[in-house]
Amino acid sequence: MKREYVNIGGRLPRVDGMVKAAGEAMYTGDLSLPGMLHGKLLRSPHPHARLLKVDTAPALTLEGVRAVITGEDTLKFLAGGIASPGNEPYLAFEKVRFVGDAVAAVAAVDEETAERALALIDVEYELLDPVLDPFAAMAPGSPLVHDDAPGNISFETDLSFGNAQRAFATCDYVRYDEFKTAPIRHGFIEPHAALASWDTSGRLTFWGSKQSPYFTYRNMAKALDIPMSKVRIMQSYLGGGFGGKNEMFNLDFCAALLSMKTRRPVRIVVSQEEVLYAYRQRHPAWIKLQSGFMKDGTLVAVDAEIVAEGGAYKGIGALSLYLMCTFLALPYRVANLRAKGCRVYTNTQPSCAMRGHGVPQVRYAAEVQLDMAARELGLDPLEIRLKNAIQSGDTTGNGFEITSCGLSETLLEARGIVERWRGETPADSEPHLKRGIGVASYGYLSGPRMAGHNTSAALIKVHEDGRVGLVTGSTDCGQGSDTVLSQIAAEVLGIHLDDVQYGGMDSEIVPLDPGVFGSRVTFITGNAVKWAAEDVRAQLAGVAAGLLDAEPDDLEFRDRRVFVRDEPDRGLPFAKLVKSAQYSGTGMTILGRGYWAPEDIDLPRFDTGMGNQSGAYSFGTQVAEVEVDTETGRVKVLRLAVSHDCGQPINEMLVEGQLEGSSIGGIGHTFTETIQRRRGQTMNASFLEYRMPTALDACPVEVTHTDTVDEMGPFGAKESGEGVQVAVMPALVSAVHDAVGVWFKEVPITPEVVVEALGRGAEAAQNADARRGADARRDSRDDGRSRDGESA
Amino acid sequence: MVEITLDVNHSSYKVGVEDHWTLLDVLRDSLGFTGAKKGCDHGECGACTVLIDGTAMQSCLVLAVQAQGKAIVTIEGLARDGRMDALQTAFHEVGAIQCGFCTPGMIITARALLGRNSDPTEDEIKEAMSGNLCRCTGYVKIVEAVQRGAAAGKTGAGTTGATNADS
Ligand code: FES
Ligand code: FES
């Protein structure tokens, strides 16, 4: 059961809201320093080429140009890499590997001069055959993106528990389907920006737009070969990230190196067009999926082959692939699973984490297939999910320990929502407008636990007026973590949210922290803040105990006061206590320190998928209602609902905001968004051509929470905000099927795709399709095969 | 370089500009009004929206020289006499702000809408805001904030910097 708190659980407006509303929040591109130069990057127009010559001399003769750097001016540090060393240079040497790979960088007195200088750099390329399709990339004889990666294989995961092949033979019903998801973009509106200032003592101060400032801190020191103590990373406000601002990028490095060369501050703000073609994307995935069930809907076995297009570099792709494979084990019980994943290099922009990190792709496939199976078995989609829903106390075959789980509760909630909606939905008003409702569920992690440094840390400084300052290395990219972390500190100290000032990131003082990814901040950093606040409380309780002649353990901190439990009059104001501690005797400095990461976790192995990925898992069910115009193929999303188990929500309003944003984002991923490329060239590198949802696509989102508390989470909280994006695509696809009777196994479902599928009416052909696929792959029994073949 | 006079946030500024400089760049780089954000520089995201004689315009599509003699209001100029605009408060209170990068453009666009239609329907709000992209919020709370801002305007709680210019 949930407890009553003062600062936890309510609808508190965010701590940075007014500053942002006033237009006073400074993002990196808003910052400038005296004497600042402007940098720009020269990018390869070719997807794959050998660099024969990069002549910067003509550019250097242009008035106003202060420095030009190429790969030869660097130490050739290679960035990225989890599970093995990285392979991405910040400035290319030897080869360029995608259209947009950076070849040189210029610093000049203004942006226009820098732009003109780029045109003067003389680059000679020897064109190489590009590898533009992951399947062609794996074929024998394909050109290699990296010489040391035969077959263009970037990483492989082979997860197996139980015996899927044998288990299929015992199933009443087995089906095989092939799914495909599109390359999509993060879509943050603030372009990447970096400001670097180098001084004579050899110290670099850097402001960036980074989700994880400490990744930049580490890589910066290595790439420039300077001591970490000489790197100072500051963090401005951050204009959205969604996974796309996690890594240190070439602009960050180039701003620093150009500043080092010119002894001037250098700012680089890339254009949105550059963001769209030269930085990161979500891995597109090809998923072959076979699942076996008993008549009653029990999921018995799953076998998947996943090919993920990694683009030109490794990045953090090993983790992405691992997550794609392992999240076939959640959120349903399954005793037999084989998931083989292969991340493949191609000459396109690199793929990385994006909201839901790999999981949206595979769960789209698995949830849609589950619905197809339910229909074939004559079961309700919610019943089949309830039948298989994972429960608190379960451990998945690969080792995920489910310590708290409200999935079944969310499914029951969803059942009520579906019934209500069906009752409210009018009969189709026009013959060409068809309504449908779909559901899908998800599970997600609350912060990945990986080898290496993974601990969050927090510091709290108590001011003499009873206010406190809080810093952590986690950044707020919009999700509201500054607020959530401040609420946690306030709750422990019995003060008000207003009393906590969240300080910015500054690596000089802020402790090491991996930053923002994998939905880790509330759960992991939240616990670190709780510890830091408890540290402060213990120090102050020691002083108060003397003043009040009581035991420290008997003291309560509440409503800006400290008093003896059950004797509210025997106490003193928090501010007075602080002053007493600081002013009496030698005077105490009250600094609270906390650090935390889940302990005793069987660390995950990315190659086998075994191990426990997180200290806690969130769950939920998404419901969607759509209206399909069968003449134009347009799908209008009428409303969405999410029933969510994020443990104890720290802030209802912020959780709602996460769920709404994730949900509406998923509408774009399902119906409009895809990166179009021709011969490696991005054809829609603008917001006009790459269609993200606008206000016109927004619909009401009903949000409910389950009554779940996670023992390990701070005040019982788990992740929210990434997980829900996992189930949006399948819920929408299933709603479209409900409306028009067609399954779509490839997203996005653009109007053309819908019209074509409806026009085709070639059910028989598709049935044959599905059977052929099954025959080709399955060596299990012959009966109970897929018959539900109408698909697109 | 020519010297022009711009009327920004109720004060007048003399500033040297090149013919091809956008109003957005001059506001940000020459005058320090960085509340107008540069998301795309191509009229596609709405983050740079400012009021020009009460009409919401994407300042990356306006040349600075064209803006002479017009009343320009950026997000920094919306609060009057130390009081935040009702829309600013509403955006904050209903949770319509996440990363905040789209927020200045959103609030300015909404202010112009309320200037010409003090009681917009939900559809009218969505239509008016459809040129402003937000990846964080999903727009649900943004629409709610505009509704709340409109209601506050009716009770006189808001300050309106916008006039009924283009409608
Ligand atoms: S910056 Fe002007 S519309 Fe995007
Ligand atoms: S709040 Fe981040 S783009 Fe709107």
Image: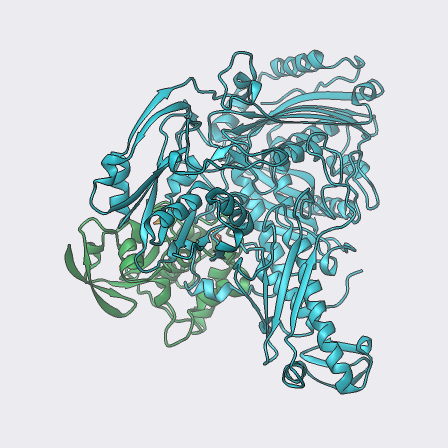
Chain colours: A cyan, B green
Rendering coords of residue A326 (x, y %): 71, 34
Residue A724 vs A283, above or below: the answer is below
Q: Quadrant of residue A300?
A: top right
Identify the residue shown where x is 69% and y is 74%: A494
Residue found 85% across the figure and 20% down from its top: A170
User: Looking at the rendering, which quadrant does residue A714 occupy?
Assistant: bottom right
* A97 is higher (above) or lower (below) than A760: below
Nearer the observer, B50 or A32: A32
Quadrant (top left, top right, bottom left, bottom right) of the N terminus of chain B = bottom left
Outermost residue, front direction? A201
Q: Position of residue B114 (x, y in %)?
A: 39, 62
Task: Quadrant for the C terminus of chain B, please.
Answer: bottom left
Coordinates of residue A267 in the picture (x, y in percent):
36, 51
Is A524 left or right of B137, judged from the image as shown?
A: right
Residue located at (56% from left, 22% from top): A149
Q: Is residue A201 visible?
A: yes
- Asked if one can make out residue A435 in the rendered structure from this viewpoint, the answer is no
Camera-nearest residue between A492 and B79: A492
Res A33 quadrant in image: bottom left
Q: Name the side, left or right, on which A731 lies relative to A633.
A: right
| Numbered marks: total | 0
Q: Nearer the viewer, residue A535 or A644?
A: A535
